[in-house]
Amino acid sequence: MKTVPSDAGAEAVILDWQRWDDDEVAQSAEYYRIKILTEEGKKHAEIEIPYVPGYPLYTKITDLSARTIRPDGTILPFDGKIYDKVMYKARRSTLRAKAFTFADVQPGTIIEYRYIRRWTEGYLLSTYWPLQRDIPMLHAKLSLKPADTQGQYGSFFTYIGLPAGVLPTRKGNDINLEVSNMAALRPEAYMPPEEQLRARVNFFYTDSKVTAEKFWPMQSRIFAEEIERFIGKGGKADAQRLAQGETDRLALLRKIYAHAQSLRNHSFEETKTDQEIRKERIKEARNADDVLKKGSGFSTEINRAFVAMARAAGFTADAVRVSPRDEFFFTDKFPDANQMSGEIAVVDVDGKKIYLDPGTPYAPFGIVSWEKTAVAAIHILDKGDPVWLRLGLPPASDAVTRRHADLRIEDENLAGKITVTFIGQEALVRRLSTINEDEAARKKAIEDEVKEWFPDGATLNLTSVSGFDTSDSELKATFDVTLPNLVSSAGSKVVVPISVFTSKSKNPFAPATRTHPIYFVYANLEEDEVKLTVPEGMKVATLPAPETLDGGAITYRAETKRQEGAITFKRSTNVGVSLVDQKHYSALRNLFAAMTTADQQPLVLVPATSAASK
């Protein structure tokens, strides 16, 4: 085999994947047989086997063995080094991996490896079979032996994307599945989360034997009882202290919100060992007053403490349970309470509902972290049954990137100052991405992002940055910049790309066809202003034509004006939608192509004495 008939461009192929899950003894055994087809495919010889090392799973990888089968048929048992690698570390969760690389791999090589994953006995772990990978798979055989819960727990399995006529089957209590010729999951720009699209089978345990149809009505009541019991009648002392001398109701709510945000948030801290947790006496709070007394809590606990304080101050305030959409989109077909893992608050102020996110550090007042917006939610009422609703997508004005450049021409370069301001959601995203980093790492993250907007060789010197350690709306950075090789000459004419912030931009929707929906994770507004000082002795010969493109939910505007000794270019893009069906791809592709073309219109300067000047 040199190619995969159904995927001629495949760089490698999974010839066989077998997995045996046994929840009775808390272990899962896996075997892979993979063929490398191209030079590019050699990267698949770098293996990472993930596991969760800490509480409550205490997972470990054992019985790992591997071998290489060379193209001539000789076999080379693996005797290299196996590393323990941190794959993900944030908040209180850590994902590690056993990592190793097969030696002497070339096109035509087959690699094989097997291992056993073991976890805490007695812990009922949901099972996930990912049937689509980034390379095609010719055959998979999977089985699961569920734990015998003596009727104490219910269980369900669900599936999506299976080939026609292929379904999981039960033999006794065991679940079995065998599939062939699974296509690869190919990445596309602005696609929904991969786990949302991937063909898969999920097996869940539930804490009752309720049917799938009745699961969510029952679960919403469980959430309501738990949340209202935690809120109780707490927050009175803090609310009274914050209300002293404050007559403006909205100002008071902001003070309560700021106080909640000031509490130590364990959910966003670096992962701690069990010994560190015991030393610091970190444990779940019993109620809202417990959170406020300790001055710390986990994200949902802080959210509920805020609701308690707001109620104690006389506001109509409630918790809202939400289904984050950063990894999956909620479906009521999955009887898994973990889908509704997020929580925010809603407060009525003069008849207007304000949604707030006190459990997310540095979230500006009125801004909810994007993954908890435009999702299914459960409004937990102080009195009465919980209410299901769908939260709307916040407007683009809640997520603004504002870029300003003041530049001059120096030979073939542009030089000057740049100010970048991230507002609302855009500020929050960047704060959270570096929340456990030091000041130097935060500055580098901003520098790296801004540098990506410009051609290779650009030099940026960060002169100031503010807004990382605050819930204020703005995060601002200023730079001294030199942008090389942007100015070109043609005879006496000087050509300058005035839309400097998009000088490297390309149409992200260049492919003629599209497989997946288009997913903008949140509505956003981008505003650019570039001021270019015209060199002495030069005049404008050609200004870029103004452009307005209206795609309905997505709009673009650009305009260039002459001023005394300078040119000012203004550009804005407004994306007011999140999920776009792929049937609209052609129109979207054409719109972004037109935007890219408009961004490339140059400014042309000529000597002031030239007859060509206008």
Image (cartoon, rainbow, N blue to C red):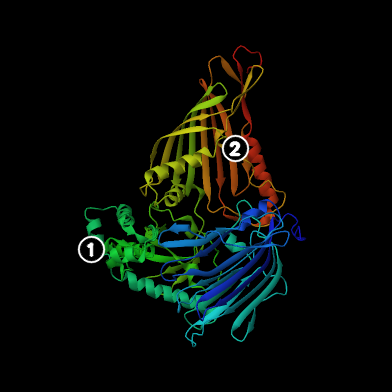
Secondary structure of residue under mark 1: helix
In the image, which disc is placed on residue 504? 2
Left or right: 1 with respect to 29?
right
Tag 2: amino acid: Lys
Across and down, in percent, residue 509 comes to 66, 47
Q: Quadrant of the N terminus?
A: bottom right
Secondary structure of residue under mark 2: loop
Closer to viewer: mark 2 or mark 1: 2
What residue is at 32 percent from the left and 63 percent from the top?
276
Q: Are marks 2 and 1 in contact (CB under 8 Å)?
A: no
From this viewpoint, which residue is outermost toward the top?
Answer: 609
Q: Nearer the viewer, residue 416 or 91?
A: 91
Tag 1: amino acid: Ala
Between the C-alphas of marks 2 and 1, the distance is 55 Å
Question: Could you tell me how many numbered marks the image carries?
Answer: 2
What residue is at 32 percent from the left and 68 percent from the top?
283
Across and down, in percent, residue 527 comes to 51, 39
State whether residue 383 appears in this view: no
Dot 1: few (<14), some (14–19), or many (≥20) neighbours within 10 Å? few
Residue 10 versus residue 492 in the image, above or below: below
In the image, which disc is placed on residue 123? none
Q: Quadrant of residue 37?
A: bottom right
Left or right: 432 with respect to 126?
left
Q: Quadrant of the C terminus?
A: top right
In the image, which disc is placed on residue 237? 1
Q: Quadrant of residue 479?
A: top left
What residue is at 46 percent from the left and 74 percent from the top?
220
Residue 516 versus residue 405 in the image, above or below: below
Across and down, in percent, residue 439 comes to 37, 44
State whether residue 121 appears in this view: yes
